Image (spheres, helix red, strand yellow):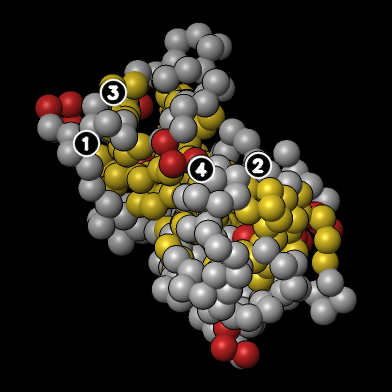
């Protein structure tokens, strides 16, 4: 579910670091043991794409946490934030983010996903600019933003080893955390050095969606790929999720690199489990696990209708 800008602004806070923290100077007789794990969604994004984060906090016990908050130092507002426990619906006058998670009993986990629509450098790290895409987050039990830096009383949790999102300027790579159904596409200026372009039309909003093609992309495909053409396209749509609907992945190749007889064109789809599926041209209006081929100027367009990501390449 998408929350308001005000609520989303808060969700980001939770996202930041991965650390196991065992208090040495407990505020109570038996403080909880915290484990925070943060995953960048995805770890690499295109220069104009959104960057996302998923944070999981596990209370390993033995004590319960009666009240848990999630905050961040960066003043950049996220475009999207959801939590499966509590809410992200408050911001203090300084603009810092704030989530109220509530109680987290021993053995329970809270997960928050947040995405920023634009890159930022003012992370708040060390009191000044930090690495782009590397926000500083803290979980605490006081509700006071960065009250003690996560170093005392067992009431705060931070990750001193958090890593930032990597930004890749290569035109053969595109995508990130897709906040809408706007297509994700690599460089469409085809040439001898760029023989294929890839476009993904996401099946839903708020997903990890990336596309990469070019000579550096490779998949294991033996028999049916003996007469392959163009290049491989690596497609990631929500980390391998299988969708109920089929969405188009469009390959654009130069006509001089494709078979003269367009009716001969098929596509190899290498699934995440390594299995290779041969996709024929669609023969009905049901666009599922099949392709539609058409000439476009001096190029050939191949629309591939699938319900999951993987490696895609034209074959004959």
* Residue 14 seen in the current view: yes
135 is higher (above) or lower (below) than 298 = below
Q: Is there a contact, CB below 8 Å, between mark 3 and mark 4?
A: no
Q: Residue at x 48, y 40 (%)?
A: 237
Q: Where residue 21 appears, x then y in whole percent?
A: 46, 66
Above-or-below relation of 107 to 262:
below
Residue at the spot 35% in from the left edge and 45% down from the top edge: 233
- Disc 4 crowd rating (10 Å Cα; few below 14, some 14-19, many 20+) is few
Residue farthest top in this picture: 284
Report the quarter where the C terminus lies: top left
Q: Mark 4 and 2 residues: CB-CB less than 8 Å, in contact?
A: no
Q: Which residue is mark 3?
A: 277
Q: Residues within 10 Å of mark 1 (few under 14, many from 20)?
A: some
Circle 4 residue: 107
- Dot 4 or dot 1: first in sequence order is 4
Disc 4 to disc 2, how far (Cα)? 15 Å
> Mark on residue 84?
2
Q: Is residue 247 left or right of 163 when viewed as pictured?
A: right
Q: Earlier in the sequence, mark 1 or mark 2?
A: 2
Counting residues from the start of the chain, the first of labels 3 and 2 encountered is 2
Q: CA distance from mark 1 to mark 3?
A: 14 Å
Please tell me which of labels 4 and 2 falls first in the chain. Answer: 2
Identify the mark at residue 228; answer none if there is no mark.
1
């Amino acid at each position: 579910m998408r929350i308001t800008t005000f609520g989303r602004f808060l969700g980001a806070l939770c996202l930041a670091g991965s650390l196991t923290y065992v208090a040495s100077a407990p505020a109570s007789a038996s403080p909880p043991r915290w484990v925070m794990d943060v995953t960048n969604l995805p770890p690499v994004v295109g220069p104009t794409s959104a960057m996302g984060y998923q944070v999981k906090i596990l209370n390993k016990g033995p004590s319960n946490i009666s009240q848990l908050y999630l905050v961040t130092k960066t003043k950049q507002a996220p475009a999207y934030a959801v939590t499966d426990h509590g809410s992200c619906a408050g911001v203090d006058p300084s603009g810092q983010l704030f989530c109220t998670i509530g109680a987290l009993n021993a053995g329970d986990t809270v997960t928050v996903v947040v995405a920023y629509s634009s890159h930022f450098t003012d992370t708040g790290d060390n009191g000044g600019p930090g690495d782009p895409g590397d926000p500083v987050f803290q979980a605490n039990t006081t509700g006071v933003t960065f009250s003690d830096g996560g170093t005392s009383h067992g009431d705060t949790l931070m990750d001193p080893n958090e890593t930032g999102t990597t930004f890749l300027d290569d035109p053969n790579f595109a995508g990130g955390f897709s906040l809408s159904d706007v297509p994700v596409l690599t460089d469409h200026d085809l040439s001898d050095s760029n023989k294929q372009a890839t476009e993904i039309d996401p099946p839903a909003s708020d997903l990890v969606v990336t596309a990469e093609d070019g000579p550096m992309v490779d998949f294991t495909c033996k028999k049916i790929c003996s007469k392959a053409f163009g290049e491989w396209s690596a497609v990631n749509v929500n980390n391998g999720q299988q969708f109920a609907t089929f969405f188009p992945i469009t390959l654009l190749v130069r006509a001089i690199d494709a078979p003269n007889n367009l009716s001969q064109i098929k596509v190899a789809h290498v699934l995440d489990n390594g299995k290779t599926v041969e996709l024929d041209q669609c023969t009905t209006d049901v666009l599922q696990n099949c392709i539609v081929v058409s000439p476009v100027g001096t190029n050939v367009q191949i629309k591939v209708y699938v319900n999951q990501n993987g490696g895609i390449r034209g074959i004959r």
